[in-house]
Amino acid sequence: MNDEVRQWLRAARRIVLLSGAGMSAESGVPTFRDAQTGLWADFRPEDLATEEGFRADPRLVWDWYQSRREGVARVQPNAGHLAIAAFQQRHPGRLLVVTQNVDGLHQRAGSPGVLALHGNLAEDKWLEPPRPCCDPARLAQGRPPRCPACGNLRRPAVVWFGEMLPKAELAAAEDAARGCDLMLVVGTSGVVYPAAGLARATGGRVVVINPEPSALDDAADAVLRGTAALLLPELLEE
Ligand code: OAD
């Protein structure tokens, strides 16, 4: 099966790689649905990762994101991220990374033009539309930091449940999905839309890479049961 997929890869002019939390598992980032350990074991991510949850307890949600930020800052891109970036360097313009991950590891590995559909853990933004007094360079420190004049809160610049994905990124991802000959779907449970829908809206072949069954297996022309850091170097290296 790997040989057939390698052949598809060699022939494909336009490739989209759609990644989810499993892409970073071997870097030591717990996957979304496995992340609730220790301090956070009593909370469901679906409750914390919402505007409602943040408004109900800004400190709790801010601290949860801080702990994830610190976790991500301590880890490195894995062999899978690096194999993708190296392929892109050898074949400029041929492979586009579309990710649901907010950990920035594709970018740190050197992938250019990553479409981060769910935002970036390292960045903040205003909770309310900013007023003239709201200046990110002049914050009252706190958990979360706030505008000293009006009290507007900073929040993580990630997409929460119930929120729209960034329009430009989603449109670019949809275009790329429609236009590609091959889509590699790596490490995602495939249950969160609209990201998962990209694998169903492509005209190209779909290859799922995941050690476990996923909700996108039925959309795949090939399913490779294995991990990102093992299989991607094997597939992408010449
Ligand atoms: P999940 O945590 O739901 O799923 C992780 C997937 O990775 C599972 O299918 C695992 O089998 C697979 N996996 C685990 N280890 C792997 C490895 N080493 N190599 C390859 N695959 C592996 O994460 P996502 O599908 O990314 O959105 O979740 C999608 C979205 O749900 C997240 O982006 C997040 C959440 O809601 C938002 O926060 C908006």
Image (tube, rainbow, N blue to C red):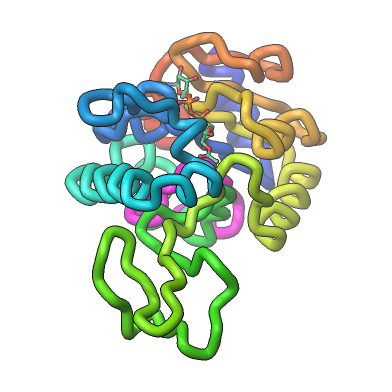
Q: In which quadrant is the C terminus drawn?
A: top left
Decide: is 133 above or below 18: below
**58 or 75: which is nearer to us?**
58
- Can residue 97 be seen in the rendering of this structure? no
Residue 207: x and y in percent read 62, 24
Q: Is residue 150 above or below residue 24?
A: below
Q: Quadrant of residue 162?
A: top right
Q: Position of residue 144 (x, y in %)?
A: 33, 61
Q: Does residue 59 appear anywhere in the picture?
A: yes
In the rendered view of the protein, which quadrant contains the N terminus?
top right
Residue at figure coordinates x 73%, y 43% from the top left: 177
Q: Quadrant of residue 168?
A: bottom right
| Residue shown at the point (80%, 35%) measured from the top left | 201
Q: Residue furthest left?
A: 74
Quadrant hosting residue 181? top right
From the viewer's perspective, tell me whether residue 88 is left or right of residue 138. right
Residue 74 horizontal/vertical position (percent): 18, 46
In the rendered structure, which segment of residues is drawn in magenta?
Answer: 90-109
> Quick check: 162 left or right of 29?
right
Q: Residue at x 51, y 64 (%)?
A: 127
Specify whether residue 99 is painted magenta.
yes
Q: Residue furthest bottom?
A: 132
Q: Nearer the viewer, residue 137 or 203?
A: 137
